[in-house]
Structure formats: C-alpha cells, structure tokens
Image: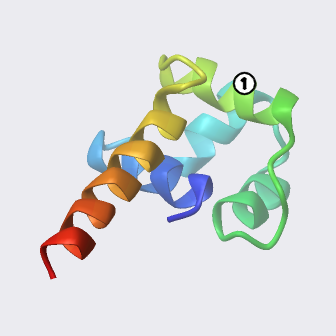
Amino acid sequence: MEINKYIREFIKKNGLKFTYIANESKIDMKKFSRMMTGKQKIDTDEYEKICSSLKVEPGYFFNQKLLENKSYENVQEVF
C-alpha cells in the first residue's frame, strides 16, 4: 500500500476531514486531494506538515507500511 493510502485511512479512521488536514498543513485543497488519490507525489516537506497536522511522528506511516509488508511476507511463507 502506498503512503497516501495509509494517510487517507488514518484520516477516515479518526473521523477527520480532508479539508481540515489540508488547511492545517497549509496545502492547497486541490493539491492535497491529488496527493491523497496518488495523482501527485507527496514531497518531504508536505509529508512532514501532514504528519504534524495529524499529530503523528513522520515515521508513523512508514512503520505501518513495514508492518504490512512483514505480515504479507509471513503469509507467503506459510503457503
């Protein structure tokens, strides 16, 4: 899963609004929307602003990705 999908999932799970996070991150809503749909890459500065707005450490979503990949590898080993 791409980082943008983890961010989207986090926003939805926590009952937040995309417009709120875009405003808090000081990112134009159209650009934020393109980043969340994967149509535009998220640069490092924007990623840090988004994490700050979500009140998570910048490594949070990368850790989620590593955990998912590790779980996937374990499933592969079983079969």
Q: Nearer the viewer, residue 45 or 12?
A: 45
State whether residue 28 is above or below residue 56. Answer: below
Q: Position of residue 13 (x, y in %)?
A: 28, 48
Spot the residue most to the left: 78
SS at mark 1? Answer: helix
Q: What is the quadrant of residue 72 in the picture?
A: bottom left
- Crowding at mark 1 (Cα within 10 Å: few <14, some 14-19, many 20+): some
Q: Amino acid at mark 1?
A: Glu
Q: Which of the image's four quarters has the C terminus?
A: bottom left
Residue at 72% in and 24% down: 48
**What colour scheme was applied to this rendering of the protein?**
rainbow
State whether residue 56 is above or below residue 9. Answer: above
State whether residue 73 is above or below residue 39. Answer: above
Q: What is the quadrant of residue 24 in the picture?
A: top right
Q: Is residue 65 left or right of residue 4?
A: left
Residue at 44% in and 44% down: 66
Spot the residue most to the bottom: 79
Q: Is residue 47 left or right of residue 43?
A: left
Residue at 80% in and 29% down: 26
Q: Nearer the viewer, residue 29 or 50?
A: 50
Q: Nearer the viewer, residue 1 or 39?
A: 1
Q: Is residue 55 left or right of residue 47?
A: left
Q: Position of residue 42 (x, y in %)?
A: 80, 48
State whether residue 9 is above or below residue 62. Answer: below
Residue at 73% in and 34% down: 47
Q: Position of residue 45 (x, y in %)?
A: 86, 27
| Number of numbered markers | 1
Q: Which residue is mark 1?
A: 48
